[in-house]
Amino acid sequence: DAGITQSPRHKVTETGTPVTLRCHQTENHRYMYWYRQDPGHGLRLIHYSYGVKDTDKGEVSDGYSVSRSKTEDFLLTLESATSSQTSVYFCAIRRAKITDTQYFGPGTRLTVL
Amino acid sequence: AQKITQTQPGMFVQEKEAVTLDCTYDTSDPSYGLFWYKQPSSGEMIFLIYQGSYDQQNATEGRYSLNFQKARKSANLVISASQLGDSAMYFCAMRESLTTSGTYKYIFGTGTRLKVLA
């Protein structure tokens, strides 16, 4: 258990509304990641953070923004949700030891109507 | 080109038998890592096993082993003595360096769905 929680776990929203997903970790990890999971695509990186206020884009960042004002929290915002953003969103931390393994939160299922 | 390829969308195995899930990768980074994750129907991503590019021996973790063939760029997961609880989606992933920011990039395959039959 890597001490990662995500909220909300499920959300249904309407097209055009802003949505914020929260990832919270308790182990003081420097690196945090947001992925989306869609059938046939595996996990794709949206944004990642390498420290407080330090973030960078992943391969599918359009329509998403992130913020990290505290080590323990990494927020993902959909500025104006679209149906194509219906997905399962996973947060991950990188445990910076020998293997630099990623550990994942439980996921958030987002439906945009 | 796909950096991580899992060519088996779905597989069946009889309970108590061994099964191999295929994964091939492509990278020019000499220092990379390979991972396998399990995703049961409940949805969480569970880390199973890791293999470093410089590791001389195949990684093992209980009933899981990673058949690492570096020259062939393959990192197949072997599950011995399959159990009903092994039914899940399995993802292969690779860690490589991002030279621009000095951090790592993780790339995932599209997964293999394994069904264990009683």
Image (cartoon, rainbow, N blue to C red):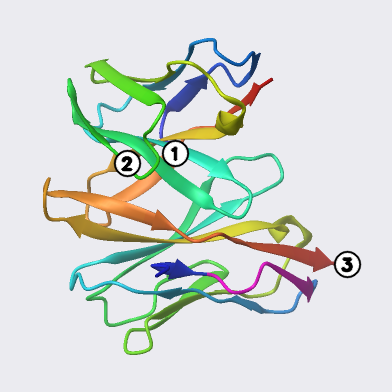
| Residue at image coords 41%, 35% | A2
| Residue at image coords 78%, 60% | B84
Assess whether residue A9 is covered by the magenta stretch: no
Mark 3 touching mark 2, by CB under 8 A? Answer: no
Chain identifier of the residue bearing label 1 in the image:
A
- Can the viewer see residue B42? yes
Q: As displayed, is residue A52 above or below residue B32? A: above
Q: Residues at marks 3 and 1, common chain?
A: no
Other residues around mark 1 within 10 Å, as few (<14) / some (14–19) / many (≥20): many
Other residues around mark 2 within 10 Å, as few (<14) / some (14–19) / many (≥20): some
Which residue is the site of mark 1? A35
The quadrant in which residue B49 appears is bottom left
Q: Nearer the viewer, residue B97 or B19?
A: B97
In the picture, the quarter occupied by the C terminus of chain B is bottom right
The numbered disc on residue A58 is 2
Mark 2 touching mark 1, by CB under 8 A? Answer: yes
- Looking at this view, name the residue that lies furthest to the bottom: B71
Chain identifier of the residue bearing label 2 in the image:
A
Quick one: SS at disc 2?
A: loop
Q: Nearer the viewer, residue A63 or A58?
A: A63
